[in-house]
Image: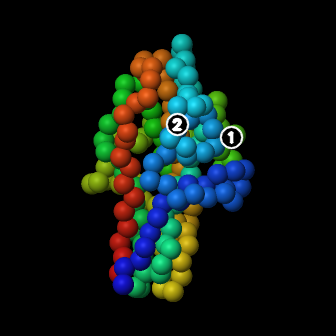
Amino acid sequence: MAATTTIKSYHGSTGATTADVTAARFKLADNDTADTNNRIPIPASGTNYSYVKHFALNCSTSPSSLIDTVQAYGDGGLATGVQMFMQDHAYTDPTSQTTTALGSWTNNYTTYTSSAPLSLAGSISNPSTGKIQTNYLQMQMGIISTASAGVMSSETLTISYLES
């Protein structure tokens, strides 16, 4: 029987708080509430950054045998003035990186496509359940001066895996 999977978002200084998500808003707050609070302001120059988001694929029922080859990719484009950074990485306090890009990230979201996805290390086998990835899919949004005011349209992020 196929496993039941969800995408969880992790919060707090250690990632101990989790929530199942189907949508998340990048903003200046450590939550996934899809509202217009805590917006990222458009700077006159430079870049303003969101809090870092942490996502992981989870099994709520065990796979028949194994889940591995976890990958993530976007839908190919972003609005003008919007940057998106993503990487496979250990948990980092999301409130600690709002003035600079996390680590040595580059604006790379649009380079990860279905034909060239970001590989996320980890696997889970029967009879286990829980977090599949070794690390987390970390994402952070950057807003530069050429961005338009208002709520941007949704972007699709796909997290895929193989189950055997």
Query: Which residue matches tag 1?
Result: 95
The x and y percentages for residue 87 are 50, 50
The image quarter in which residue 5 lies = bottom left
Tell me the residue at 51%/86% (across/down): 127
Q: Residue furthest front?
A: 35
Query: Which residue matches tag 2?
Result: 35
Q: Residues within 10 Å of mark 2 (few under 14, many from 20)?
A: few
Against 157, is 95 above or below? above
Q: Of residues 3 and 65, which is closer to you in this image?
A: 3
The x and y percentages for residue 63 are 43, 81
The N terminus appears in which quarter of the rendering?
bottom left
Left or right placement of residue 10 versus residue 65 in this view: right
Distance from disc 2 to disc 1, alpha carbons, whole Å, reads: 19 Å
Instruction: Specify the amino acid type for callout 2.
Output: Asp
Residue 89 visible in the picture? no
Residue 142 visible in the picture? yes
Disc 1 element:
helix
The x and y percentages for residue 101 are 58, 35
Left or right placement of residue 144 versus residue 95 in this view: left
Against 51, is 74 above or below? below
Q: Are marks 2 and 1 in contact (CB under 8 Å)?
A: no
The C terminus appears in which quarter of the rendering?
bottom left
Tell me the residue at 60%/31% (across/down): 38
